[in-house]
Image: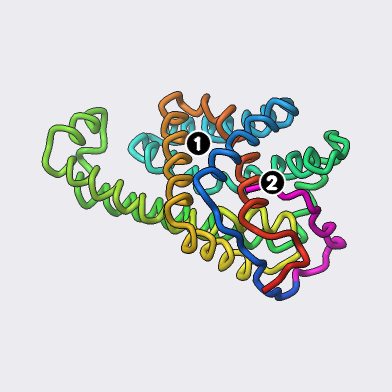
Amino acid sequence: MADPTTSSMNAPAAGRPAQASKAPVTRKVLIEDIVGSLEQGVRDFRAAPQFGLFFGIAYAAAGWLILALLWHFQMPYFAYPLAMGFAIIAPFAATGLYDVSRKLERGEKLDWPGVLGAVGGTRHRDLRWMALVTGFVLILWMDIAAILTFAFLGFKSLGPDIIKELFTTPEGLIFLILGNAVGAIIALGVFSISVISFPLLFDRDIDFVTAMSTSVKVVLENPRPMIAWCALIALLVMVSLMTVFVGLIFVLPVLGHATWHLYRRAIKPDGDVA
């Protein structure tokens, strides 16, 4: 599929609420589009590495801070579920990268005031509500993780021997299987409502409900390539977690740029509405 080049509408004036919108017209997404979007993501990262590294380091630093707090409050058992849930808010963290890719696409000048200003301008749009939705899901996931932890492992097992408990006892193995299964279901749901909605809300002045429904529509109409994209994201995030978030410094910008290009391939240019 050819990469769309038609520019979207300009950002709305500050403070103007998003209006209820007709659903944008979706396109057919193929595996080739996933591969092409990832290649374009790498290209954009290489074209403007200073921005990608800035957002990647900031995101990784937030992960390190969370791990430090968990260690300080003696709650290391929450490190894994929180690290996995941390990926839920990654699309919002990549907002600045959408602006970089859009400017590169349009051949516009890239500078720090412009990129950071574009990120700050999202507080006046419905993208903030989408961020609230994903933040709520993160809190819900942590609550579920806590319930499962205490139900299967109890309070006595939450100590230095927790790793041994997880892999050598029936309760620990059931906890791992059930916890990961529940986490996968939640992650797939969040992926469905957010994979297209975040770049769509950044690019256009529409309401977040329309954006979420459009994102779900893209996933339902293109299950195989979109599930493949979800699995790739999960794999890259897992590798990043194994490096204690260091890998996120590079993974986040590449995925952020790639998500923008996938959105451009999945949604027709602004002006074509259903």
Q: Is residue 39 above or below residue 180?
A: above
Rounded to the nearest whole Å, what is the CA distance between mark 2 and mark 1?
Answer: 38 Å
Dividing the image into 4 quarters, which one contains the C terminus? Answer: bottom right
Kind of residue at disc 1 = Ile
Disc 2 or 1, which lies upstream in sequence? 2
Q: Does the segment drawn in magenta span residue 7?
A: yes
Residue 21 relative to residue 67: left or right: right
| Residue 132 spot, x, y in % from top left | 59, 59
At x 36%, y 50%, the residue is 184
What is the number of the mark on residue 66? 1
Residue carrying label 2: 3
Q: Measured from the top left, where is residue 41 in percent x and y?
A: 63, 35
Please state which of residues 154 and 196 is positioned toward the viewer in this rendering.
Answer: 196
Q: What x and y, as percent, mark residue 185?
A: 36, 55
Q: Which class describes the residues within 10 Å of circle 2: few (<14), some (14-19), or many (20+)?
A: some
Asked if marks 2 and 1 touch (Cβ < 8 Å), the reply is: no
Range of the magenta residues?
1-18
The amino acid marked with disc number 2 is Asp
Could you say whether the residue bearing mark 2 is in a helix, strand or loop? loop
Q: Is residue 218 above or below residue 262?
A: below
Q: Crowding near pointer 1: few (<14 within 10 Å), some, many (20+)? A: some
Is residue 71 left or right of 163 when viewed as pictured?
right
Residue at horizontal 49 percent and vertical 63 percent from the top: 221
Query: Is residue 16 inside the magenta stretch?
Result: yes
Q: Residue at x 17, y 41 (%)?
A: 173
Residue 44, picture quadrant: top right
